[in-house]
Image: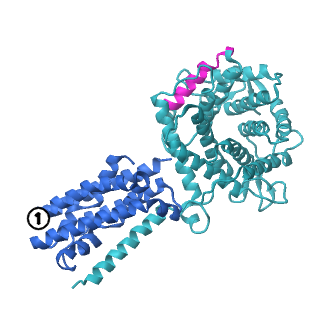
Amino acid sequence: MTTQLALLAMLGALNSGRISAAAPVSVVDRRGALTVCVGALLVTIAFFAWVSAPVIDALGVSEPDARIAAGIALLVVAIRDMAAPGPMPQPGLGGSLAGLVPMMVPVAFTPAVAALAIAIGAESGVVGTVGVAVPALLLITVVVVLAIPPSWLSWITRSTALLAAVAGVLVTLDGVRSI
Amino acid sequence: MRTLRNRLGRALLGWILVFGVMAVAVHPEDCRTPTAIEIDLAAEAAVGWFGANIETEGRFLYRYDRDRRVDEGGYNEPRHGGVLWALFQAERAGVPGAAGIADQGLGWALDRIQPTPIGPAFGEGVRLQTGSSALLLAALDERRALTGDTQHDTLMIGLGRTLAAAINDDGALDATIHRDSGPMGDRSAFFPGEALWALARLHITFPDEKFDEPALRLGRYIVEERDEVERPWPPISDHWVAYAFETMDRWPDAPSIDFPARAWIDRQLGLLGLQVRYESQRVGGITTLTRGHNASGSGVGTLGEGIGNWLELDSRTGLLGRDRDALVERGACAVGLLVDRQARSDDPRTNGAWFRLGDTQMDDQQHALSALLLMRGHLPT
């Protein structure tokens, strides 16, 4: 998988519109939750990239097949994001912990993110995976901090989902065509 | 009103659903690297199958149903030529007795050399397939390299000229030569690769006969036009062209691999990798529903042959770069599958053979044997 494709896939998987929609309304809570969410995502993605090789070995699949799985997961999640209504801040934990629930789980950290972190991690290592995740996390930060109105968020969510669907197909094809 | 527990429960269901879809799309691969001894034993058993199943006039048992214990008849001359090649290859690789069996089979083929308007060709009846002559030619050339016997040189050059004459100006190869009227303008999926390989071999053995020109014309057509013109979909892996490229690289004036060729090779490598990965996911049970039944011995064997030849070419040229390790892994997996799936039995029509749904064909043993021998030197350490 090229770096560009990995970047595109991670931008699509970490849907900034959906994550922002799940953030608390209060400005103080919102910023605290954002910090927790982005930090938790960074650690989790790095962890999945770190364990990617043993996970792939344990599952008995090859790296190209891991990419196929990641591409399919991304496509399924993208279709859900295009069709389903945007998430709400409630029910969820209060204050900064909203960064964990609902922002991190269940909104940001999807099977697509986990599968992508494993697929990219197996090929590019922890640093490479975190490297392609950082722009997506920065975008999340910008969208959440700007507190974009819901009508715009919906547009961002669906555009990002469309991007994710395209990336999902491309990642799947990349796995299919690989040796 | 939704509670936090409901929300997380729904998310968990979503994860299970997505992983369910992923599990259907991607299965564990049942791959292992066989030892050199296992490969040698499997190759000997395959040669043994040919020895046990050759008729007195030199024809082999073609198709056998082990469940009904029935010889299902039929025959295929290109595959006869392919079997001879694999047996001479086996003898050169150190499998004793293979050349003796091949010589018996060679007699049957030599009795079926017929004159046509464009030269001698191998086959029965009036419609002679160019693939038959090509693979017989490859077998004769392998025999010549093995024994130093030059008695068939005139026939080899004649067959080579026939193949060259069956190549059109655009590089396409006619699949059939009518005994009385010559090339018939039809096409075949694998004969071009077989003819290219045969001509490439001839250019090494008889460099003054100028077989390189038709070979290059045919090779150019295969790489740049054939897939679009003759069979746009689905793409197939062509192990014979891998043999041909490996051979052409040994020409004293070896052609360079330019961009169209490199792009074509990359597509082939991807196909080979995908097919091996897919095949290795067929472990029976529920995977029969999602992946179907095991491929035939010839199906898996051709993958090993293709990979073995590209690896051989890479070991001289470094063509594959970082892809080599992955290709070695796939090739080892292919021969691992062959070793594990080879039948052992008291029935000489079964022992040493590869079966799919209870049937084996002689080309199952041919391709599997060649794959084992080609990959033996490229197993991961």
Query: Is B121 or A151 nearer to us in this picture?
Result: A151
Horizontal side of B213 relative to B35 (left or right) equals left
**In this rendering, does residue B189 appear at all?**
no
The image quarter containing residue A125 is bottom left
Q: Report the residue at 61% width, 32% height from top.
A: B246
Horizontal side of B81 relative to B296 (left or right) equals right
Query: x, y (%) of residue B32?
Result: 63, 56
Query: x, y (%) of residue B62?
Result: 77, 47
Question: Dot 1 corresponds to which residue?
Answer: A147
Q: Report the residue at 30% width, 78% height from top.
A: B8
> Chain letter for blue?
A
Dominant secondary structure of the magenta stretch? helix
Query: x, y (%) of residue B378?
Result: 64, 43
Query: Is B72 or B51 nearer to us in this picture?
Result: B51
Q: Report the residue at 71% width, 37% height from top.
A: B78
Q: Is residue A94 above or below residue A168?
A: below
| Neighbour tally class for label 1: few under 14, some 14-19, many 20 plus, Cα within 10 Å | some
Query: Callout 1: helix, strand or loop?
Result: loop
Q: Colour of chain B?
A: cyan
**Residue segment shown in magenta:** B208-225
Q: Please, what is the three-letter code of the amino acid marked with disc 1?
A: Ala
Q: Is residue B267 above or below residue A7?
A: above
